[in-house]
Image (spheres, rainbow, N blue to C red):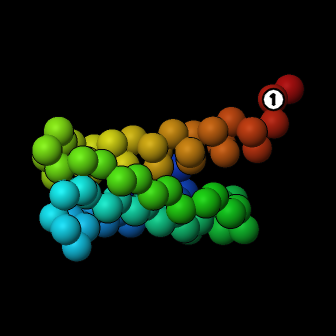
Amino acid sequence: MSFEHRGFRVSVDVVPDEADVQWLCCATIEGISEEARTAVIPNIELTIPRLKIDVLMALNMIEHRAVSSIDEWHDRTTITP
C-alpha cells in the first residue's frame, strides 16, 4: 500500500513472521517533490504481536509513524520568519 504526504511517497508493507506470531511492518519513505527529493528519512520498522493487534491496526500504526516522521522533518526544515 502506498500514499503521499507532504511531498513524500510512503510504501507500507505488513506481513506475518515465519512463525505466524507477529506482524512485521515496514514503511519506506521516499521524497518525490522538489523540496523533499534530497531528504533522507529512515525507513520505519515495527514488530507487533498478532494476538493483540489485527492487520488493519498494524497498518494504521506504521502509517501514523511514517506521517509523524515526515511532519517532524518538515517542521525542522521549514524556515520561520
Q: Determine which quarter of the picture holds residue 38.
A: bottom right
Local crowd size for mark 1, using a 10 Å CA cut-off: few (<14), some (14–19), many (≥20) = few
Q: Is residue 31 left or right of residue 67?
A: right
Rendered residue at 34%/59% (across/down): 25
Q: Position of residue 61 (x, y in %)?
A: 33, 42
Circle 1 sits on which residue? 80
The image shows a total of numbered marks equal to 1
Rendered residue at 81%/36% (across/down): 79
Q: Is residue 58 left or right of residue 64?
A: left
Rendered residue at 70%/62% (across/down): 39
Rendered residue at 68%/63% (across/down): 40
Instruction: Choose between 78 and 66: the one closer to the eye.
Output: 66
Q: Determine which quarter of the picture holds residue 3.
A: bottom left
In the rendered structure, which amino acid carries the disc numbered 1?
Thr
Q: Is residue 70 left or right of residue 37?
A: left
- Where is 11 relative to 50, above or below? below
